[in-house]
C-alpha cells in the first residue's frame, strides 16, 4: 500500500490537538510516533507525527492473519513550531499512558527533545531499532552484536511501505545542510516525508518485528529500553536559541485550524483537522520530492 497524502491531517490548533489526544486515549492501544526538528535533541521538536489504525481494527498475533494492505492508517501531523511547542503538552496523558504502546524507530533524539524541551516522557515504548538489533543477535551464530539500521532498511527487511523518494529528499536537504523543518508554511513535501516515517511502522513492521523477537530475547530487549530511558532522564537542558519560523512564500493563507498553507502556481489543498478527525475530504496535487 502507498501512502495516501489525502488522508494525512494537519493540526495547528491546541483545541484540535486536545480532541485528537482524547480520541487516542479512548480508542487506541497501539500508535506510531515520530518527531521532526532541526538538530532534534539539541533543539526542540518542530513537528509531531502520529499514526494508528481505525478504532475497529482487529490486532492479531500473527502478521500473516492481519489485514495490513487494504486498511490505511490514520495519520496526523501536528505543527509544534508556534508557541514554543506548547501544543505537545496536550498529549501528555497519551505519552505517559502505560496502556498505549508507543512505537518509535530509534527514539533516542526524540525522547531527548521531549524531555529537555517539554519536560515530558514516554511510557510503554517499543523501539523498532532496538528490537531489530535484538533480532540480528538472535540469528547470529558467532554472537556478533547487531547493527543499527535506518527506517528505510527496516521497512525493506520487514515488509513495510518504503518512502520512494527518501534518498533524494535526504540529498536535497540533509546532506547540503539546508534547514527544512522550520520552514513555514508547510508544503505537501513536508507532510509526505513526515507522515511516511510513521506510515512505514504500522501495522506491518511493528507486527513482524514483534513476531520475530523471541520470548527469550524480551528480557534483554527490555533491559536496553530501560537503559535508554535512564540515560534520557539524566540529561540536562542545553543552552540554544529558540527556532524561529522561516516563511518561504510571501503569500500565505491561514488554515481553519491555525496552521498555514504554501501558495504556488498550482492550487493545492491540505486536509484540515475537524471534530470528526478526517471525515472531510482533502487533496494534495503531488507529493514527490
Image (cartoon, rainbow, N blue to C red):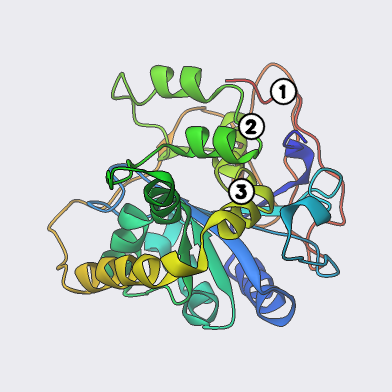
Task: Quadrant for the N terminus, please.
Answer: top right
User: Contact, CB < 8 Å: mark 1 with mark 2?
Assistant: yes
Q: Is residue 227 left or right of residue 137?
A: left
Q: Residues within 10 Å of mark 2 (few under 14, many from 20)?
A: many
Circle 2 SS class: helix
Q: Residue at x 87, y 57 (%)?
A: 279
Provide the residue designation for mark 1.
Answer: 286
- CA–CA distance in space, label 1 to label 2: 7 Å
Which residue is label 2 attached to?
A: 188
Dividing the picture into quarters, in which one does residue 284 lie?
top right
Give the position of the C terminus as an image quadrant: top right
User: Would you place residue 215 above or below residue 267 in this image?
Assistant: below
Q: Which label sits in the foreground, 2 or 3?
A: 3
Q: CA distance from mark 3 to mark 1?
A: 26 Å
Does 39 sit left or right of 156 as displayed? left
Q: Which mark is residue 205?
A: 3
User: Which one is in front, 185 or 79?
Assistant: 79
Amino acid at each position: 500500500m502507498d501512502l495516501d497524502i489525502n488522508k494525512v491531517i494537519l493540526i495547528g490548533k491546541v483545541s484540535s490537538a486536545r480532541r485528537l489526544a482524547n480520541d487516542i486515549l479512548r480508542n487506541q492501544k497501539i500508535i506510531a510516533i515520530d518527531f521532526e526538528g532541526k538538530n532534534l535533541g539539541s533543539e526542540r521538536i518542530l513537528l509531531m507525527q502520529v499514526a494508528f489504525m481505525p478504532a475497529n481494527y482487529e490486532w492479531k498475533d500473527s502478521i500473516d492473519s492481519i489485514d495490513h494492505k487494504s486498511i490505511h492508517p490514520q495519520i496526523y501531523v501536528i505543527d509544534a513550531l508556534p508557541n514554543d511547542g506548547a501544543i505537545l503538552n496536550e498529549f501528555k496523558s497519551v505519552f505517559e499512558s502505560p496502556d498505549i504502546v508507543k512505537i518509535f524507530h530509534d527514539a533516542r533524539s526524540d525522547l531527548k527533545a521531549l524531555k529537555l524541551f517539554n519536560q515530558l516522557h514516554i511510557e510503554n515504548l517499543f523501539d523498532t531499532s532496538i528490537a531489530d538489533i535484538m533480532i540480528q543477535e538472535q540469528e547470529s551464530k558467532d554472537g556478533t552484536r547487531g547493527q543499527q539500521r535506518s527506517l528505510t532498511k527496516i521497512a525493506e527487511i520487514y515488509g513495510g511501505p518504503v518512502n520512494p523518494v527518501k534518498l533524494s529528499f535526504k540529498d536535497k536537504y540533509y546532506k547540503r545542510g539546508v534547514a527544512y523543518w522550520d520552514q513555514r508554511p508547510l508544503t505537501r513535501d513536508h507532510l509526505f516525508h513526515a507522515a511516511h516515517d510513521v506510515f512505514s511502522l504500522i501495522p506491518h513492521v511493528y507486527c513482524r518485528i514483534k513476531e520475530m523477537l523471541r520470548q527469550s530475547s524480551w528480557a534483554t530487549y527490555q533491559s536496553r529500553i530501560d537503559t535508554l530511558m535512564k540515560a534520557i532522564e539524566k540529561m540536562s537542558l542545553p543552552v540554544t536559541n529558540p527556532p524561529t519560523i522561516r516563511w518561504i512564500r510571501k503569500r500565505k493563507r491561514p488554515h481553519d485550524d491555525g496552521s498555514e498553507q504554501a501558495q504556488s502556481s498550482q492550487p493545492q489543498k491540505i486536509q484540515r483537522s475537524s471534530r470528526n478527525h478526517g471525515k472531510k475530504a482533502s487533496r494534495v496535487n503531488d507529493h514527490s520530492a
